[in-house]
Amino acid sequence: MADSNYSLSEGFILMGVSDHPQLEIIFFIVILFSYLLTLLGNSTIILLSCLDARLHTPMYFFLSNLSSLDLAFTTSSVPQMLINLWGPDKTISYGGCVTQLYVFLWLGATECILLVVMAWDRYVAVCRPLHYTTVMNPRLCWLLAAIAWLGGLSNSVIQSTFTLQLPLCGHQKVDSFLCEVPAMIKLACGDTSLNEAVLNGVCTFFTAVPLSVILISYCYIARAVLKIRSVEGQRKAFNTCLSHLVVVLLFYGSAIYGYLLPAKTSSQDQGKFISLFYSVVTPMVNPLIYTLRNKEVKGALRRLLAELWILCGSPR
């Protein structure tokens, strides 16, 4: 036990793709490029939502929350991935691993709740347009955002603490790119059936149930959109809702695959790449999906760039 405690105090080894060292430089370049795009895209959405008065609406309030969350989500894991991929040292300190475990799970669970809140916002906007400003008032928006962040934090505190109670018996090699619950369960040397049951139950609550609610709400939204007589109105409603729906399917699909499969029976390589997908790819494509299909965001970006051009080009 003393040897076990000593080895754990030395930290963990994040294996990543160390069994295929020829791929490390490729993964490093791809992940670095994705991370830079994530920083640029999500920072732009936050900046536009704050500076442009036309975007001071509930939809963009929640979108800026999602962008803030994605920035923190990737920053909690990607820098450590890049360090481990760049050189021979694959270690992460015990404190760093525990912090990553708590933060990553907190932000992931928060996004699960936030996407439901955003679906509710779209439902009210499309199905109850005359009552939208009354229902989605600033106080309710802040309350829903707080529920999402605090709900995710509660889940992380309970589930991460429960996972860290598992006996690791000195095992240090985490066969993943980051410290997360499924990878830590696979590291345990004792009976993990209870942990797997809790993981499946909690993840069903935070993924399968919210996804079902979102899909049901979009059935009502689709029915309401089809009743709109204006073709332009239908197109605008579909474009806005389709962007959110694509984000939902990308995030929940990868999260369900990574967390709801039995922790010790799923393919390890598949699990690693799925975790890479929802920790790196999804936060990168979220701002692209929202900006490329959203005229309001593109208009706000053009206005901001025009103001910067005038400011930089004006005589001193």
Image (cartoon, rainbow, N blue to C red):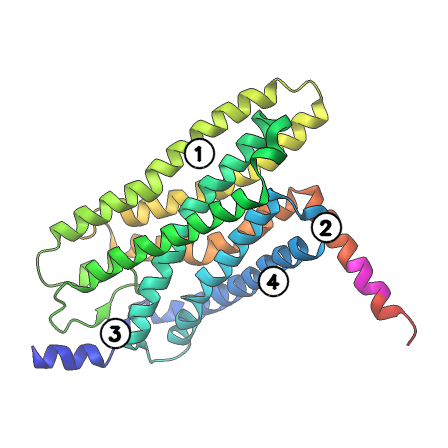
> In whole angstroms, how far apart are the C-alphas of marks 1 and 2?
29 Å
> Of the residues under marks 3 and 2, which one precedes in the sequence?
3
Counting residues from the N terminus, which is met first, the one under dot 4 or under dot 2? 4
**Residues in magenta?**
305-310
Circle 1 sits on which residue? 214
Q: Are marks 1 and 3 in contact (CB under 8 Å)?
A: no
Q: Which residue is mark 3?
A: 12
Q: CA distance from mark 4 to mark 3?
A: 31 Å
Residue 272 appears at what percent x and percent y?
32, 58
Q: CA distance from mark 4 to mark 2?
A: 21 Å
Q: Report which quarter residue 20 is drawn in.
A: bottom left
Front residue of 289/237: it is 237
Q: Provide the secondary structure element on which disc 3 rests.
A: strand
The residue pinned by badge 4 equals: 40
Chain-order first, disc 1 or disc 3: 3
Q: Amino acid at mark 4?
A: Leu
Q: CA distance from mark 3 to mark 2?
A: 47 Å
